[in-house]
Image: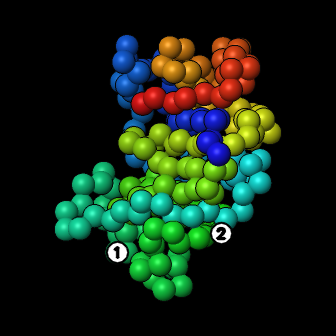
Amino acid sequence: MQRPYVYRVTKYDPADHDEHGHYAGSEDTVSDHGEVEASYLQSVAAFAEDTGVDHLTVREPQVPSFAHFGSEPPLDGFGLAGLFPTGPTGFHDGAEVPLDIALELVRAMLRDNGAWCRLEAEGAFAVHVGWDQYLCIGSSRPCEEALAQTCAGAVPGTPELLSVRDGDMAARPSNGLGWKRTLAWDLRHGGSIVRR
């Protein structure tokens, strides 16, 4: 089963993107370790709950070998300390984690601590953090409640849910009429496909 609904949660204003859809504004591309980060995590939790998911599987786990290229200082254990009973060796492809641990893995990715993975419930849900804190969420369901919660939380300085349909529709801020029109169009046409 495919995940036909794909969403991108981001703190960046859609007006600050260039003609190719790349962010060109002045917003910092690192985690604030505060309200914005908490909003990202609340969005993941809301979409997982709306999909009916309480455990996720680690896919494609990665940690840096010798060099650290992240924008934040490296941490011992790559942000994995205390997350797995067996230590960092528990961070492997196929490891199943409860949602609270999955959220901590997303936090580590947002903070660019070194660990990265894709988290999924096969055929139902997936989440990963892309470059510059673009959070990509896929679900087998439209997640209308999670969309409403994420949109209601969109205030200046917190993430906005953006939707791009096959690259031919402009991203819209979640708190405006443009977002409602884009969302309605996307839901009528089977979800949205996100392009970076």
Image quadrant of residue 112?
Answer: bottom left
What x and y, as percent, mark residue 144? 78, 35
What x and y, as percent, mark residue 114? 35, 62
Amino acid type of the residue that numbered disc 2 sits on in the rendered structure: Pro
| Residue 88 visible somewhere in the drawing | yes
- Out of 192 and 49, give the one closest to the viewer: 192
Image quadrant of residue 60?
Answer: bottom left
Q: How many labels does the image show?
A: 2
How far apart, in angstroms, are the residues tagged by discs 1 and 2? 23 Å
Residue in the image at 61% along x and 62% along y: 56
Q: Residue furthest left?
A: 66
Question: Could you tell me which quadrant the C terminus lies in?
Answer: top left
What x and y, as percent, mark residue 192? 60, 27
Q: How is the image coloured?
A: rainbow
| Above or below for 2 versus 21 | below
Crowding at dot 1, Cα within 10 Å, few <14 / some 14-19 / many 20+, comes out as: few
Name the disc covering residue 98, or none: 2
Q: Which residue lies furthest to the front in this view?
A: 1
Upstream in the sequence, badge 1 or badge 2?
A: 1
| Above or below for 78 versus 7 | below
Crowding at dot 2, Cα within 10 Å, few <14 / some 14-19 / many 20+, comes out as: few
- Out of 41 and 182, give the one closest to the viewer: 182
Name the disc covering residue 76, or none: 1
Left or right: residue 189 versus residue 159 is right
Amino acid type of the residue that numbered disc 1 sits on in the rendered structure: Asp
Q: Are marks 1 and 2 in contact (CB under 8 Å)?
A: no
Residue in the image at 46% along x and 68% along y: 93
Residue in the image at 37% along x and 75% along y: 77
| Residue 155 visible somewhere in the drawing | no
| Above or below for 139 versus 54 | above
